Image (spheres, rainbow, N blue to C red):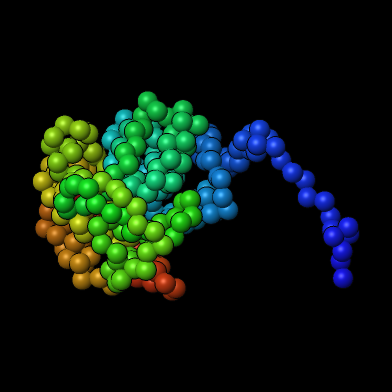
Amino acid sequence: MMTDEAAPAVPKLTIEEYEKIDPGVRIEHGGVVMTFSTPSKFTVWRAQSIRTKEPCTLEWIETFQPGEVMVDVGANVGMYTIWAAATRQARVYAFEPEAQNYALLNRNIRINKLADRVIAYCLGLSDTAGLSQLHMADMRVGGSCHSVGEPLDFKLEPLNSAFVQGCAAAVLDDLIWGGSIPMPAHIKIDVDGFEHKVIAGARRILRDPAVKSLLIETNQNLPEHRAMVAELGALGFTFDPAQVGRAERKEGAFKGVAEYVFRRGPA
């Protein structure tokens, strides 16, 4: 049996030394170097998997013209916000209601020196505005599958919340027509099951031809999401079934979920 005397010594950090620890992951694309702050194993995974987790999202961002506006709904810690602003010189308005993720999102904006192109808001977007609650699936920095307003998971089934955080919700139509943010050319929506509510709150702007494309995480198992796809079709947006097929999860808990890229006009 190992005695206390035989136990290896554990080095201790002073608070000053601990505060100097600043882990991060550097990623290069097209000659542009991006740095992502990674205070946990989960955020390291987010950074290291960015090329493989949602390749269709990166392909979509690659089509942006410099200076175009992107709205990122459900920005998390800012992986795609930073990628769009750094590699395509997009102007990004990012929305993330979860407090820990919002703090890290802003840190990533700052360390990449993108404050002139990106602004983040600690808001959830939905079909109604006002004070609300964020039902959190887990407490990890970089976590996802949280829900604004209702304790439901990405399948719209009851969620056993790890914590309930106060948050504010807004409607995209109100923000744009009220002059808070400009009309976007591109909109990314990834809010783990509540994407149809964001679309319901954006019906007015989606009739504007200035909106060129959307990327929406879509759960094809949900009738609400199938109706959302049909509604976007009626508004003049089309998608490529082959692209959806490449993005679709074929197994596991997220089977049937895929990023749909919608573009205005013929497919």
Task: Give above or below for 259 relative to 99.
Answer: below
Q: Residue furthest top?
A: 116
Residue appearing at x 84%, y 55% in the figure: 8
Residue closest to the eye, 64 or 34: 34
Quadrant of the drawing holding the C terminus? bottom left
The answer to whether residue 192 of the structure is visible from this angle is yes
Residue closest to the eye, 67 or 39: 39
Residue closest to the eye, 68 or 173: 173
Residue appearing at x 46%, y 51% in the figure: 142
Residue closest to the eye, 213 or 12: 12
**Is 47 left or right of 203, judged from the image as shown?**
right
Q: Which corner quadrant of the image does residue 222 belong to?
A: bottom left
Task: Give above or below for 113 relative to 246.
Answer: above
Task: Give above or below for 37 relative to 198.
Answer: above
**Is 5 left or right of 55, judged from the image as shown?**
right
What x and y, as percent, mark residue 32? 51, 34
Quadrant of the drawing holding the N terminus? bottom right
Residue appearing at x 38%, y 72% in the figure: 255
Q: How many marks?
A: 0
Q: Which corner quadrant of the image does residue 69 belong to?
A: top left
What x and y, as percent, mark residue 3? 87, 64
What x and y, as percent, mark residue 221? 28, 72
**Is 156 left or right of 106, judged from the image as shown?**
left
Residue appearing at x 25%, y 62% in the figure: 150
Q: Which corner quadrant of the image does residue 225 belong to?
A: bottom left
The answer to whether residue 219 of the structure is visible from this angle is no
What x and y, as percent, mark residue 212? 22, 43
Q: Residue furthest front?
A: 4
**Is 12 left or right of 258, judged from the image as shown?**
right
Task: Give above or below for 58 relative to 66.
Answer: below
